[in-house]
Amino acid sequence: MTTLKPKWKTLTLTTLSALCSLCFLSSVQAAIIPVDINIQATNTFDEGYGDGVSSGDFSLITGGATITSTYAGATVTGTNPLTNNLVNTDDGIGFTGSALTTDDTFNVGFDSTIDVANNSVSDIYDIVFKLVFSNMVSANGIDAYADSEFTLFANGAELFFTDLVSDTVNGNEIDGVADGNFGGSLFAADTLFFNFALNPTDLLTLDLSWTLEGGDFDGGESAFDFSQFLSIESVTLRGGQVPPSVPAPGSLSLFVIALFGLVARNVRKNK
């Protein structure tokens, strides 16, 4: 029986451990979008807005890779707009924003689009989108307000709407309805799913619009905080069939296998 030298024994055990871990990671699969379905996303910071102390970021995830740009006031760092095809489930677009100001004003605007085309001439696909959002406004003092409005449209029809207004002069509103209060914090957050059936040659356009404005004019304070992410939850061929899947990236797998082979070769040399 041959005994491995300590350093080779340690390296062998380390390599085997890494290989086992990789096997576990490779078992996690991401669903790819069927070739019949083409999805293009565009995430746009509206440069007509962006006044004041507001800041945040906007992103696009494609193939599991995230592209992010940031903004501060009207200044964007990175690409604007962000645009690419969405190719996997969990791909999508998102944006965030926040501000806290005294004796100042702010406004932010985003106009983003996801276009979906079923290029099949015979197959029906069911597609589910997932929306995760958080919306907060706050105003305090003699004359302060913050108004954060987010809307999601599907082929021009309103699909979802949230509008929070905190106003110390004119009163607060939640989705257009006065709540009887003046100023203070208002908050809304949820995770929503939207289901669509795409017949052969169908087109679906999702439009996202977020506008935020506010300010303080008399020594009080105005603030907002917002985030949203709209992603592809699933795409299935009508009739219960599931799109093919792809394993986790294989470059690490090849590296570990090659390393294990190198260890084995050196072990044989040292027998």
Image (cartoon, rainbow, N blue to C red):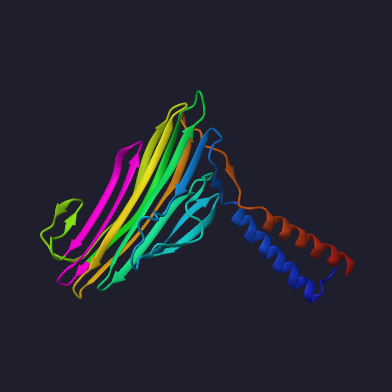
Residue 54 quadrant: bottom left
Depicted 122 relative to depicted 115: above or below: above
Q: Position of residue 236 (x, y in %)?
A: 48, 36
Q: Does the magenta stretch include residue 205?
A: no
Q: Residue furthest top?
A: 122
Horizontally, residue 192 falls left or right of residue 117, namely: left
Depicted 15 relative to depicted 250: above or below: below
Q: Residue furthest front?
A: 48
Answer whether residue 4 is visible to the viewer in this image: yes
Q: Nearer the viewer, residue 224 or 9?
A: 224
Q: Position of residue 35 (x, y in %)?
A: 56, 35
Q: Which of 266 and 156 is in front in this view?
A: 156
Q: In which quarter of the image is the N terminus?
A: bottom right
Q: Nearer the viewer, residue 218 or 118?
A: 218
Q: Nearer the viewer, residue 53 or 39?
A: 53
Answer whether residue 191 is visible to the viewer in this image: no
Identified at 48% across, 60% down, the residue is 69
Q: Where is residue 122 in the image (x, y as percent from the top left)?
A: 50, 23
Identified at 68% across, 60% down, the residue is 19
Horizontally, residue 96 falls left or right of residue 15, namely: left
Q: In which quarter of the image is the C terminus?
A: bottom right
Q: Position of residue 97 (x, y in %)?
A: 36, 62
Q: Main SS type for the magenta part? A: strand
Depicted 101 relative to depicted 191: above or below: below
Identified at 29% across, 41% down, the residue is 158
Q: Does the magenta stretch include residue 151?
A: yes
Magenta region: 139-167
